[in-house]
Each structure stands twice: as structure tokens, then as C-alpha cells.
Amino acid sequence: PGLRVARRLVLEPLGAAVGAELLALRASDPSLALDPDAAELAVRLRGLPGAIGLAGRALTRGASLETLCARVKERLSLRRDGLVVMLEVVRELSPEWASVALRQLAVIEGPFGTATAAAVLDLSAWPEAPFSTGVLAELCDSGLVEEAVGDHGSDQMRYRVPTHVRVWILASRPSLDLELSALRRAMHVAQLGADPAIGAIERRVDGYGPADLEEEVPDLLLALTGAVERGQQRAASSLLSALVAVLHDRMPVSTAMSAASAVLGMPDASPAHLALAHRAAAEICAVAGMSTEAIRHRERALVFSVRCGDRRSEALLRAASSAIGNIQHGLRIAEAMGDPHLSGRVRLRLAEALLAEGQLEQAHEHLGVAVERLGAASDRAGEARARRLLGRVMIELHDAQGGLTQLTMALATLRALREVEAAADGCVELAALLLDLGRPEDARTLLDQALGDVRAAGDAIREATVASALGELELWTGVLDGALQHLDDAERVQRRLTEAAARGRGESDGDALALTLVRLAAVHLELGRARDARPILEEALQLATGHGTTLVDAKLGLAALELYEGSHDDATARLLGLLPAARRSAGSRLGRVMTLLGRRSVREGEPDSALERLQTAVQELSGRSEGWASLARVELARVLDANGAQTQAEEVLQRAIEDLRSAGFAPALGHALCARARLRRLADRTEEAAADLDEARAIAKACGVRVRSPLQRAIDAAT
């Protein structure tokens, strides 16, 4: 690009040895500032063509060796990244108005003529810029726009923005204001009947977040009203779809419903128009909580999609079903169409349905393909969503490091897309994993950054979610006053939102409030305030009814409280009733249920049952939740001691203490130290036992626990 003449050379792929030597040589160049691990990368990849390209600083800055290996194996993504580097160079060599013009023209999907270009271009801020024909000539000279003479049987000169250039622009979006102005002009062109601009609205609106499009709602409504009045069916249904994209938290449902009714009521509507309009109406009803109406509209949309032969819409509508068989039918349609992007979207939906049924291995397989295909199609938001889900599945399959990599990559993508809400959710998710892996400081860094982002965006819902996650982190690390502060703040916001939703004024956040209450009760129990914890947990249980994992968490909290209060029969009945749900749910819940059941068996003097349950708990929790795994080991050591295996018990305790000390989980460390002190005291190792108890007392004092707290009870028992 940018050259009038070019010479093409055919190069053979480099062998492993030569590739490693060349990459090592380039890595040693101080101007590149590369890590020497780049040489090892080439060896690992066995001379893969493209490994040499990774020596470019733009592709390797801040990346680990493992991340680079993963990226190079995704060849399509590597090709895309290489094109980005080339396009960045071309942009730097072009005048500023040319870059702006290119972003404005990229709103048009497919070939376009000079009239459409003139309607879209707005370079009034650059007096030196030529007229539209001159702009097109400049961009063609740079290779950023292509000439397409005679498209659609016309002799008129037509142009197109190449796919890889449009992908680059959609991914970077360096100037949102300019692109939104281009979208507004495209809406104007759409009303004049220019199909390319309508296609742009249909496809590009998904690339913006709700906050980006909030200010466009009046213009979208105005354009939609005009399209309905003029009987322009495709423009009306496309603009309705655009409105649906900004519906969540940004626009009254009644406004959207009125718009949908107007579009559906247009006379002589075609099946294609009705299919798109019913799809939009289904989304609106789903947001409004009108599930029956949403299903009805979705079924009507499916009927009209089949009638007009719109296989793409049929596949997407089948994917929206809750039935796995229907989604699989949609996947077969997508595969038969040979559309990798559509296949990736449907596979992602199929993986979600499989996960709901507990079919982890099948979900893992589909998610791997979905990540690859969505990435190749440059659907970065879809790719990030698939990676987030893949990360959770990998954790469930005991591949915590693989899950951490996927969640980290997803979060980086969401931040690059400026998706504040999704990025905040990703931060909370990734922080929970880091906390489970015993890395609370890394988790705190993520959550602090997320808290700043959502506060700047004025997102009260997610600010409360992040504060609640910080409260759980402080609970594990023993900063109980800080945990109370964060959780009180979260509860206040979430309760206000829940009460407003009960009055029909906003979205309900009852599940989030229930989770915050569970965490708040855990802090009160750790402080020795069992009387305060019980009513909090009972309210959480009431709020969480019907919500899978949060309901399990609330019942786990009540069972732990009942064990603390000595109500062993009640706790046992509750825990045994939880087993089926715990086996289906994600995370460490099954291990936590088995830990509490094992604790109950220890208290009741049932060593065989306790041993079996606690060994299962350790197996389930290892690699998933180091804090809970260590607590299970503490209980397991008690059983081993009771069975006369004191040496093995002390080894198990030593492992737990080392892990908890490394993670900085102070209250849990105090319990482990008390268990070891008791073991050492019984073995007449009084000085060592006294040292453990002194450390446990120091932890209790730092945490500010009361006399009746679980940790203080453990200290008293060990003494």
C-alpha cells in the first residue's frame, strides 16, 4: 500500500534452527527491546512461518512466552495482527483528513458510488481536504480503498473498503464521535433507500456499547418514525434493531414497545421485514420480563425467517432456544451455509446450554471452536465472551492456569473495546479466580481499577458488584472492618435498586443483593456475631430462591452457621439436600459442601465418614479454591490425628499453613495454626505449640474478632 510499483518475492519457510537463530539475532537488537525468550519461542514453534514476525515490537510488547505461543498457533489472528501493523504505518504516512475519511466510509458495507460517499463524508474541519472524488483517489492510491468498476452491471465507477481494512477500523475505533456522526449520516442515507447504508446500520450497531449509543436514541427514533411513515420496511426494521441494542438500562421499555408495534403494524409487510421486527420485539419483551411474549415473538420470527428463506436468521433464532436439540439444528444450518462467524455464534450459545446441563467436556470442545471462529471473523466482543466462558470451563476441568489465560485475554479485549460494563464483569470474574488461586493482591489491583472505571462511568449497579467482591477479598485476608464497609456500601445500593424494581422502576438486582448478604453474614460470623448473621442469611435465602449458584451459597452459609451453633442435624439435612445442586453448579461448591459435611462428621465422632468426605473435598477444591482446599486439609488433619496418623496429619497441616501464609488468608491461617498447636501439644512439643498459638492470637487481634468468634473458639480449644 502506498507504492506505485511493487516486486513480489516467493520465500520458502524457514527451518527451526535458522528461524531460532534469526529470531534470537533480532531479539538481541536493543532497538527492538525484546525478551530473549523470543528465541525459545521459535524453537517451540518448530520454525512456524510467522514466528519471525513476532519479533515486531507491536506484537510482543508485554506478552509472556506462553501467550505468544498461543497467539502464533492462532494463525488467522496472527495474520490479522500483522495487517494491523502494516495499516498503522500507512495511516501515519497519510494526512489526518484521509484517516477520518476512511473511518467515515467504513460505515458502508459493500460497494458504493460517489454519491453515497459524498453523503457520508464530512471533512469540513479540514479545509485543505479535496472533494469526495479526490478523497477516494487518495485512499485508492494508499491501498485503503479499492476501485470496483462495473459492480452490479453498472458502468459507473464504484468503490469498496477492503474487508481487512474495515476489520481494523471496527476493532480500533479511535474516534467514537466521528464514527457516530458517520452512523447518523448513514441513517439519513438509509431513508433515501441506499441499501449499503442500511446494511451498515444492521451490522455496525452491534459494535457499540449501550453507553456509546445512548445519545443516538432520539435520532434513531426520528429516523424510524420517518421510515415507518414512508413505508420503508427494511430501514424501519433495521432501525428497530438498533434501538434494541441500546435498550438495556438506557431507554424505557414502553418506548421500545411502541416502536416495535409501529414497525409490526406497517401495511403489506414482507416476511423478511416481519422476521427482523419480531426478533427485535422478542428482545424487548425479554428485557421487560415478558417471557411468554418473548417466546411468541421469537416463534413468529422463526416462521417468517423460514418462509423468506433467511437461513441465517433461522440459525440465530434456533440458537436462542433453550432446547439443545433446537440449537444443534441451528448449528447444522450455520455449518451448511459455510459461515464461520455464524457458526461461532451458534456454537457459543450451544456451549452455554450444555453448561447448564453440566456437560463440561462437550461445552469445552464447542467453545474452543467458537473462540477460533469469532476471532477469525474479528468479532472481538463475541470472542471475549467465548473466552470468558472457556476460562470458567477450564477451571472446572482443573486447568486453572489455562482458565486464567483465557479470562485475561478476554478482559484485555473488552478494555480495548471500551466496554466498561463487560470489562467490569470480567474484572470481578478474573479477580474471583485469582482469589481462589491464592493471589489476593493481584485480585485487589484488578478490582480497584474496575471500581474506578465504573465510578467514572456512573454505573451504580456494577460499582456495587465490585464493592461486594472487594468485601469477600477483605474477608479472606482478615481486613474485616474493610470487608464490612465494602459490603455495607454494596448492600445499600443493591437494596435501593431492588426496591425500585419492585415498584416497577428499573431492573431488579435481587440475586446480586442475595450474594452480598451471604458475604456480609460470613463477616459477621467471623467476628463472632452469629445473632446478626442469621437474619441476614434468611433474607438472602428468600431473595435467592430460583437463582442456582446464589441459592447454593445462601444455604451453605446457613449450614456453616448451624454447625457453629451446634445444630448438627439441621446442618446435615441442609447439606445433604444441597449435594445435587452443588454437583451441577460451577466453582468450588461441591468441595465446600463436602468440607462442611466432613466437619460435621468430625464433631459427631464418625472418622470413616469424615475421612471419605474430606478426601473428596480436597480433591474437588485443589486447583480451584486454595483457601477452601486448605480449610478442608485442616479438617482432614483432625481425622488423621484421631486415627493415630499424627505424622501424616502434621504433613497435611504443614501444606495448609504454607499455602494460607503465602496467600495471606489470615483467618484461615489462624485456624490451621490452632489445629497444629493442638497436635503439637498432645505430642508434648509445648514450645512449638505455644509459638503457633501466639501467632494465632496475633491474627485474631489484627482481625478484630470477638470472644465468641470461630477463630477465638479454636484458640481456646487448642489452649
Image (cartoon, helix red, strand yellow):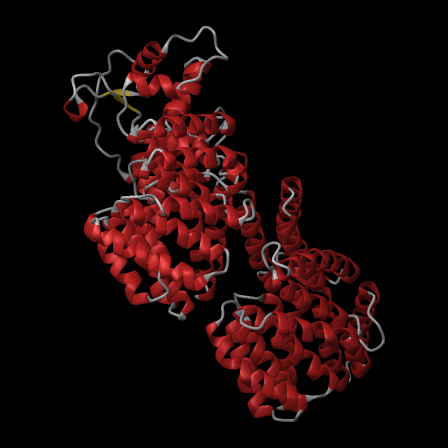
Please, which residue is most extreme toward the bottom here? 605
Q: Position of residue 100 (x, y in %)?
A: 44, 20
From this view, report whether residue 308 is shown above or below residue 225: below
State left or right for residue 453 relative to residue 223: right
From the viewer's side, name the closer residue of 555 and 650: 555
Residue placed furthest toward the left: 153
Asked whether, in this view, residue 50 is left or right of residue 184, the answer is left
Identify which residue is drawn at 53% across, 66% down: 624
Residue placed most toward the observer, 362 or 332: 332
Query: Up-down: is 550 above or below 24?
Result: below
Q: Residue at x 40, y 70 (%)?
A: 357
Of residues 11 and 231, which is closer to you in this image?
231
Q: At which x and y percent is residue 230? A: 35, 33
Is residue 542 in view from this perspective?
A: yes
In the image, is 341 to the left or to the right of 643?
Answer: left
For residue 53, say whether it is visible: no
Q: Position of residue 402 (x, y in %)?
A: 45, 56
Look at the image and tell me in which quarter the C terminus lies.
bottom right
Name the image quarter holding residue 105: top left
Quarter of the figure that contains the N terminus: top left
User: How many tags in the picture?
Assistant: 0
Name the residue rendered at 56%, 48% in the picture. Answer: 249
**Residue 602 at what x, y percent from top left?**
65, 88
- Image quadrant where residue 482 sits: bottom right
Whether 480 is drawn above or below 24: the answer is: below
Q: Taking 327 as reference, is 612 above or below it?
A: below
